[in-house]
Image: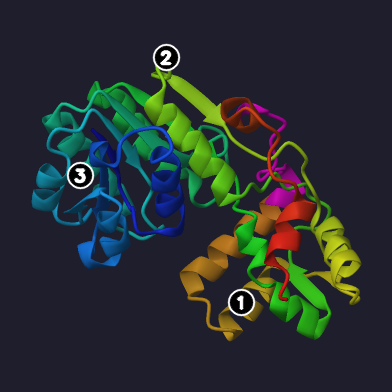
Amino acid sequence: MIVVTGATGQLGRLVIANLLKRVPADQIVAAARTPSKAADLAALGVQVREADYGKPATLAKAFAGATSLLLISSPPTPAQDAEHKAVIDAAKAAGVRLLAYTSVLRADTSTLLVAPHHLATEQYLAASGIPWVFLRHPSYIENYTASLASALEYGSIAGSAGDGRNSAATRADLAEAAAIVLTTSGRAGKIYELGSDVAFTMAEFAAEVSKQSGKRVVYNNMPQRDYRALLESVGVPATFANLAADSDVKAASRGELYTGSRDLSGLIGHPTTTMDAAIAAALPR
């Protein structure tokens, strides 16, 4: 039995879609905080179980019979560390034989604000005795393509990344990698630094948007404080605005969002989705 936590999220749904290509639907558990949001998965034959990271009793029931489990990290809130520990404790009690965790690039050396929390989870998992796999994620390229409509309207993309190279990958590629890890042997104890084969700068990203759309779009590099204020002005909560601005600046100055690893394409067995293709798929029609 394979359990996917956060199953109704954008990544979780894609992982389950990939698992359905590999194992029977009744061998997959969609663990969701709100099971009613997974009615479409239940219609496919996937087992749907309530799993609220903040309610350990639900985790025990959700993980019953599980052999493999994917812990999709919860949002970066003060409760994150405790929530992840609760999932790991419940997985251990359930006898899970492999737990894969979606961490962050180079969690053990990264200076990103989110990194210490991911590292704490990695360390707790490693000490738990459960065979583990760390799927260290880059940025999602959808974080950038999601705002293309605004970029086309205003002719600019704002940020603080300077000339930093970004190995952002699509959720689809990362979900495929997770499904492969969960359904193949010999993965325990592996650390995968995941990222796209070809990195890009935000200026290159803006230039590609211009090329494909036929509209001039430039990258507007801003001081960190100004970019954070801009995000807050359009409704981004202060905590997340600060995290976004921090990752942008550190991408530029320390390469925190870049990896030269080919672990992702190696796992999925084909080249990663290119920036060009991701933009083409996301441009408003």
- Name which residue lies at 25% across and 56% down: 42
- Position of 258 with respect to 18 (left or right) is right
Can residue 104 be seen at all in this image of the molecule? no
Nearest to N terminus: mark 2 or mark 3: 3
Q: Quadrant of the N terminus?
A: top left
Residue sitting at the far top: 186
Task: Determine the image quadrant of residue 37.
Answer: bottom left
Q: Is residue 255 magenta?
A: yes
At x 71%, y 78%, the residue is: 149
Please state which of the two labelled residues, at mark 1 or mark 2, is closer to the viewer.
2
Q: Distance between the residues labelled 1 and 3?
A: 32 Å
Question: Which label belongs to residue 142?
Answer: none
**Crowdedness of circle 2 by 10 Å Cα count: few (<14), some, many (20+)?**
few
Q: Which quarter of the figure has residue 97?
A: top left
The secondary element bearing badge 3 is classed as helix
Q: Does the magenta stretch include residue 103?
A: no
Label at residue 186 = 2
User: What separation in Å lies between label 2 and label 3 (alpha carbons)?
Assistant: 26 Å
Mark number displayed over residue 231: 1
Which region shows up in magenta? Answer: 251-263
Check residue 86 in the rendering and tell me which mark sits there, or answer none: 3
Viewer-closest of 133 and 109 = 133
User: At which x and y percent is residue 212?
Assistant: 86, 66
Amino acid residing under circle 3:
Ala
